[in-house]
Amino acid sequence: MRTTAITRAAITTAAAALLIATTATTASATGPTAAGVAGAGAHREAGQSITLPLTEAIDQLAVTDEDRTGYVRTAFKHWVDADKDGCDARKEVIKAEALEAPAQGPRCALTGGLWLSLYDDVLVTDAGRLDVDHLVPLAEAWDSGASTWTAAERQTYANDLNEPRALIAVTAASNRSKSDKDPAQWLPPAAAYRCTYLDDWVAIKTRWGLSVDAREHQALADLAAGCPNDDVTVSLAR
């Protein structure tokens, strides 16, 4: 289940504490496990939970050149209705992140409601003004390793409702300003949100085993220097 923007921080903190305790218990019983395991060459398994301080999580990301050869957006089948309830992944995000729930009509038509677009700190009262952004864009994922994935893996990435940091409802203007840029090229206009954006970017790259290029890595490190070195806890998708 996804969290709303207003409760995300509190729930993430509680989940991190639980996962840290679980990881510590497992490690004492079976030897080294997921804690601290994320980087290139490390053993990874889908479903494995890991916890790393932000700066260490950044250092664990593989640094490679990006390659957009062959990218088409349709390589990622997105906005599927996985649970067949009439609302596709995009509408599920919009409903979940509402500060005041919209009314839902036939074919998941949404009216009313209230949202806070975290990218630009704008209140939105019309779901039609919202875009649902892949926080790590599809093109960026392709550049960073998704070009080698199966079609099923790319579909799962594009509709990742199991990771509340992966998809975010924001104003169309802020989403289109960001486009497919990474943090070396674009940061949210809402400066107070940037450390959260950094944490979420690193979490998603870690979750999916995606690489970073040299400029991106430097930008992440520079931004982290001004942010709390909080733990990043993720469940690996692959």
Image: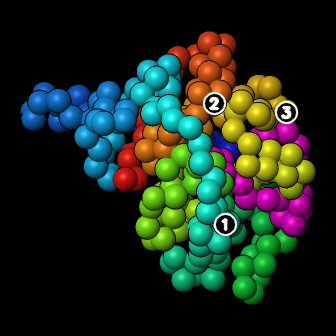
Q: How many neighbours does mark 3 have within 10 angstroms: few (below 14), some (14-19), or many (20 or more)?
A: some
Q: Is-magenta flag for residue 86?
A: no
Region of the chain picked out in magenta, as a range: 117-138
Element on which disc 3 rests: loop
Give the structural element (helix, strand or loop) at label 2: helix
Query: Looking at the image, is 119 positioned above or below residue 227?
Result: below
- Residue 131's spot in the image, x, y percent? 79, 59
**Crowdedness of circle 2 by 10 Å Cα count: few (<14), some, many (20+)?**
some
The disc label shown at residue 216, or none? 2
Residue 40 in percent (x, y) is at 36, 35
Amino acid type of the residue tagged 1 in the rendering: Val
**Which residue is denoted by mark 1 in the rendering?**
72
Query: Which residue lies most toward the front here?
Result: 69
**Residue sitting at x 74%, y 87%:** 106
- Please tell me which residue is depicted at 63% across the width and 83% down the height of the picture: 86
Give me the residue at 50% from left, 26% from top. Answer: 58
Q: Residue 222: which quarter of the image?
A: top right
Q: Are marks 1 and 3 in contact (CB under 8 Å)?
A: no
Quick check: can you spot residue 76? yes
Q: Which mark is residue 189?
A: 3
Secondary structure at badge 1 equals loop
Per the model, the C-alpha gap separating discs 2 and 1 is 22 Å
| Residue 23 drawn at (x, y percent) | 26, 34
